[in-house]
């Protein structure tokens, strides 16, 4: 079998259905509960569309609630293992704004909204992105118990580590709704309808 030549780029892009799902969503979501409801809604559709796991994220302007970017997990549709919702949302926000630091001096501050606590990879990605607020529907062992996804060796005081870097961590904003998404995913998993993409 011929081995392909060295790759010089790779692409992580949103599936087409996301734009359609956003067609009735305002450009600005001043209420945090509306941001959380949106990530739960996107997460619920994401796995059904076959894009990846039941995870979604937003980057919003922390002052106004204007949506800067939307991310969903696209590990399956992109074939890239790091293409988690947080990495997608942060990268698309940075691409849109044209800078790597979402917390640059004299610029608006940004909030990352996720339907569950980031995994060990996205913990680092969130920390280095420049966001000043992390808003989560929920956290805890349930995601691994229900979905069987491996979240990695997280530090125990993950919220404290964010706070120590000036990043406010808001947790438990809609835990029951987040768990419902995971339970629906689990039911499909049990029926053999979907793939969990844990490596090895
Ligand atoms: Zn992740």
Image (spheres, grey):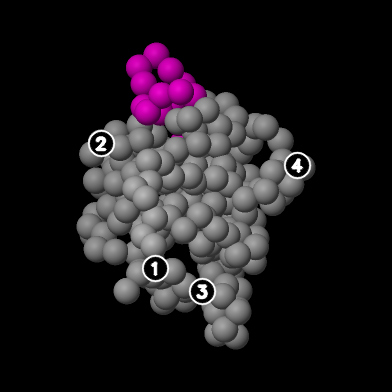
**Label 3–label 1 contact, CB within 8 A:** no
Asked whether the viewer can see residue 174, the reply is no
Question: Alpha-carbon neighbours of circle 4 within 10 Å: few (<14), some, or many (≥20)?
Answer: few
* Mark positioned earlier in the residue sequence (2 or 4): 4
> Which residue is denoted by mark 4 in the rendering?
23
Of badges 2 and 4, the one in the foreground is 4
Element class at badge 3: loop
Say which label, 3 or 1, has the lower sequence index: 1
The one nearer the camera, 200 or 130, is 200
Query: Which residue, given by chain and number where applicable, does mark 3 sit on?
Result: 195
| Mark 2 residue crowding within 10 angstroms, few (<14) / some (14–19) / many (20+) | few
Q: Main secondary structure of the magenta part?
A: loop
Q: Position of residue 164 (x, y in %)?
A: 23, 39
Q: Is mark 2 within 8 Å of ligand 1?
A: no
Quadrant in which the C terminus appears? bottom left
Residue in the image at 54% along x and 70% along y:
182
Work out how far the residue at label 2 is from the one at label 4, CA to CA, in angstroms.
36 Å
Q: CA distance from mark 3 to mark 1?
A: 27 Å
User: Which numbered disc flags the more N-terminal residue, 2 or 1?
Assistant: 1
The image shows residue 70 at horizontal and vertical percentages of 57, 42
Q: Which residues are magenta?
A: 97-114
Q: Alpha-carbon distance for marks 3 and 4?
A: 28 Å
Q: At 48% from the left edge and 44% from the top edge, which residue is drawn? A: 11
For disc 1, the marked residue is 1
The residue pinned by badge 2 equals 165
Relative to 20, residue 91 above or below: above
Q: Would the CB of label 3 be found within 8 Å of ligand 1?
A: no
């Amino acid at each position: 079998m011929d081995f392909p030549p060295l790759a010089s780029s790779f692409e992580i892009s949103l599936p087409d259905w996301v734009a359609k799902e956003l067609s009735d969503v305002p450009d600005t979501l001043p209420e945090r509960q509306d941001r959380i409801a949106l990530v739960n809604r996107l997460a619920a559709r994401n796995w059904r569309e076959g894009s990846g796991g039941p995870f979604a994220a937003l980057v919003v302007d922390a002052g106004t609630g204007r949506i800067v970017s939307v991310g969903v997990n696209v590990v399956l549709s992109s074939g890239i293992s790091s293409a988690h919702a947080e990495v997608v949302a942060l990268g698309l926000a940075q691409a849109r704004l044209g800078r790597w630091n979402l917390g640059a001096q004299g610029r608006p501050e940004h909030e990352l909204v996720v339907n569950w606590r980031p995994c060990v990879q996205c913990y680092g990605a969130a920390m280095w992105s420049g966001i000043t607020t992390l808003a989560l529907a929920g956290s805890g062992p349930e995601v691994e118990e229900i979905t069987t996804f491996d979240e990695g060796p997280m530090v125990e005081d993950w919220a404290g580590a964010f706070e120590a870097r000036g990043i406010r961590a808001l947790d438990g904003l809609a835990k029951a709704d987040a768990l419902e998404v995971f339970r629906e995913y689990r039911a499909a998993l049990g029926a053999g309808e979907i793939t969990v993409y844990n490596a090895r």
